């Protein structure tokens, strides 16, 4: 295995740019993963790994995982501690890093399936957590419109691999997509804290369903509301609303219940 000792190495400089910049990720069609689990999930999921980087300790402690990742990687390298410090996005690095190629997602939506639509979600931790819950509950896919970068290291860490596996549809106009899905017979719901809206526990979630979760601060836009039935999660006490990822989790649970 070739070794990289300098942080000024071209591959390392590219990896740092990809990790830190959505602009560079989009331009190069690449994204960055850190950590044993994410790198191993990428290899097992069939993600195209352009290059993999491991510290000496990582190779010694997790040799089988290193071999698995190397089998799937176009190139792989041992890196020095100084290079690890340059690549690491977390306080306690495990010494595993991968530079991966973005792949086109399956944009076909099954009219009889269950989907969560996310409109203008801006917190990568929320995006990742929602994807993780969606996969765990068996949701068929996610529709993203105006959201933060799902390929950011924060989103990927929060998703714990789910964003690599979940069927994702990205769109520039959520209303157009929803109108098409409604014509195919899908039920459209949008969440709101308004107490007058129908309680989500009383909704008919049978058949094909799309449920929309809105921006953390502003909620679902009026244009999207105009196409959907408003639903609310009943709350006690003085809480006025829920965190977006928590609201999505409850909504998806009701969809699959």
Image: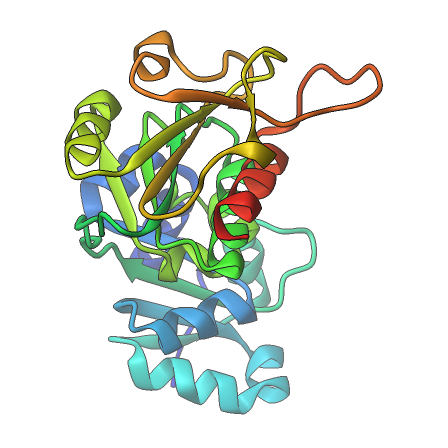
For the N terminus, the image quarter is: bottom left
* Residue 129 makes an appearance in the image: no
In this picture, is 228 found above or below 39? above
In this picture, is 182 found above or below 220? below
In this picture, is 213 found above or below 46? above
x, y percentage for residue 255? 48, 45
x, y percentage for residue 169? 25, 43
Nearer to us in this view, 37 or 166: 166
Q: Residue at x 45, y 69 (%)?
A: 39
Left or right: residue 185 compared with residue 250: left
Q: Residue at x 56, y 49 (%)?
A: 158
Q: Residue at x 37, y 62 (%)?
A: 165
Figure label count: 0
Nearer to us in this view, 219 or 127: 219
Residue 32, located in which quarter of the rendered image? bottom left
Q: Residue at x 40, y 80 (%)?
A: 69
Nearer to us in this view, 105 or 15: 105
Left or right: residue 171 compared with residue 12: left
Nearer to us in this view, 115 or 99: 115
Left or right: residue 101 compared with residue 204: left
x, y percentage for residue 218? 50, 11
Name the residue at the right extreme. 237
Left or right: residue 35 compared with residue 168: right
x, y percentage for residue 22? 34, 35
């Amino acid at each position: 295995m070739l070794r990289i000792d300098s942080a000024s190495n071209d591959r390392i400089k590219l990896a740092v740019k990809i990790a830190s910049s959505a602009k560079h990720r989009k331009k190069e069609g690449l994204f960055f993963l850190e950590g044993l689990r994410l790198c191993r999930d990428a290899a097992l999921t069939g993600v195209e790994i352009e290059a993999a980087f491991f510290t000496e300790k990582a190779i010694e402690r997790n040799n089988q995982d290193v071999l698995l990742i190397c089998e799937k990687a176009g190139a792989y390298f041992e890196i020095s501690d100084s290079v690890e410090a340059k690549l690491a996005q977390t306080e306690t690095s495990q010494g595993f890093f991968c530079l991966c190629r973005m792949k086109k997602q399956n944009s076909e939506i099954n009219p009889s399936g269950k989907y969560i639509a996310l409109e203008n979600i801006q917190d990568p931790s929320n995006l990742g957590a929602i994807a993780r819950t969606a996969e765990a509950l068996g949701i068929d896919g996610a529709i993203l419109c105006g959201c933060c970068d799902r390929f950011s290291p924060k989103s990927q860490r929060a998703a714990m691999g789910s964003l690599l596996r979940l069927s994702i549809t990205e769109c520039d106009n959520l209303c157009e997509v929803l109108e098409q899905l409604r014509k195919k017979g899908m039920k459209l719901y949008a969440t709101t804290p308004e107490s007058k809206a129908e309680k989500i526990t009383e909704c008919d979630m049978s058949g094909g369903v799309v449920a929309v979760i809105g921006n953390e601060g502003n909620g679902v836009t009026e244009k999207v509301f105009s196409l959907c039935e408003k639903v609310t999660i009943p709350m006690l006490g003085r809480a006025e609303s829920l965190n977006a990822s928590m609201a999505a989790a409850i909504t998806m649970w009701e969809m699959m219940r």
